[in-house]
Image (cartoon, helix red, strand yellow):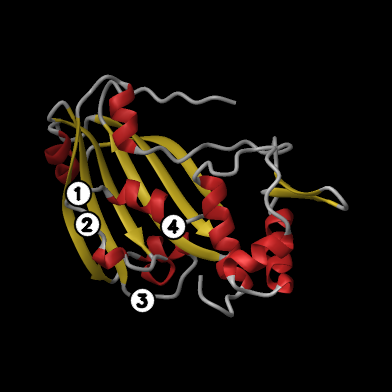
Amino acid sequence: MRQNQSHQSVQAALLKRIHSGEWTPGTYIPGEVDLAAEYGCSRTTVNRALRQLAENGIVERKRKRGTRVTPMPVARATLEIPVIRQEVMDRGGQYQHSLLLNKLGKAPASVYARLQLPEKKLLHLQSLHLCDSKPYMFEDRWVNTAATPNIEKAPFDKISPNEWLIQEIPYSDGDISFSACAATPQIAEHLETSVGAPLFLIERTTRMNETAITTLKMYYGEGFRMSSTL
């Protein structure tokens, strides 16, 4: 690790280890002295990073006992961001994906509003996820490249944007909504359905504290069923 890291970068690194499952809920993480040595920074920097994680409800700090990953968030429902490849495989299908669009450009006003960003160039990604060579889900995504280092070099011929972002970019919170919609001509073509056909739509925006990472729409065709656990 490089020297003189900011508390934001240390926080992001700690959060990534939590989201990856390295530190599971209820686990006590290393102390401030050990973390400062590991990340090549001051103990004060680590303390600020841990304080912010505690304020966000991600860790609990107990005097003389240390810091642990929050075992059960109180009064807060959460949904895990799924890896679509795993989602398809869990259904017994063979997964494939195709990147249809990868372009920097201006986004619609609604996208800047969801991301709470000023108008600037964003990365526009469109992907088609397949199950047994048949359309499974069409994904329309906008990404804040300032919050996603190296995304423009990501090997999207080998890994989907969905999976790359989950692996590489830590997040702290976000918004998600579920609704029904009718297939537009473009989406109907990708999902091999008729124009106006009913679709299941998931809209999601993720952030790292106050910084927007990505916002996307996921369109599922007829027969899709979503399940989760509490």
Mark 2 residue element: loop
Q: How far across and down, in percent of the image, does residue 22 sit? A: 54, 44
| Pointer 2 residue | 155
Of residues 230 and 200, the one nearer the viewer is: 230
In the rendered structure, which amino acid carries the disc numbered 3? Lys
Mark 3 residue element: loop
Pointers 1 and 3 in contact (C-beta within 8 Å): no
Q: Is residue 148 left or right of residue 6?
A: left
Residue in the picture at 50% in, 38% down? 80
**Mark 3, mark 2: which one is toward the viewer?**
2
In this view, 230 is above or below 138: above
Quick one: label 1 or label 4, which is nearer the N terminus? 1
Q: Is residue 183 left or right of residue 30?
A: left
The Cα–Cα distance between marks 2 and 1, rounded to whole angstroms, is 6 Å
Mark 4 residue element: loop
In this view, 85 is above or below 38: above
Residue in the picture at 41% in, 25% down? 226
Q: Label 2 neighbourhood size at 10 Å, few (<14), some (14-19), many (20+)?
A: few
**Mark 1, mark 3: which one is toward the viewer?**
1
| Pointer 1 residue | 158
Is any part of residue 209 visible from this angle?
no
Q: Label 3 neighbourhood size at 10 Å, few (<14), some (14-19), many (20+)?
A: few
Mark 1 residue element: loop
Looking at the rendering, which quadrant does residue 49 occupy? bottom right
| Pointer 3 residue | 120
Looking at the rendering, which quadrant does residue 155 occupy? bottom left
In the rendered structure, which amino acid carries the disc numbered 1? Lys
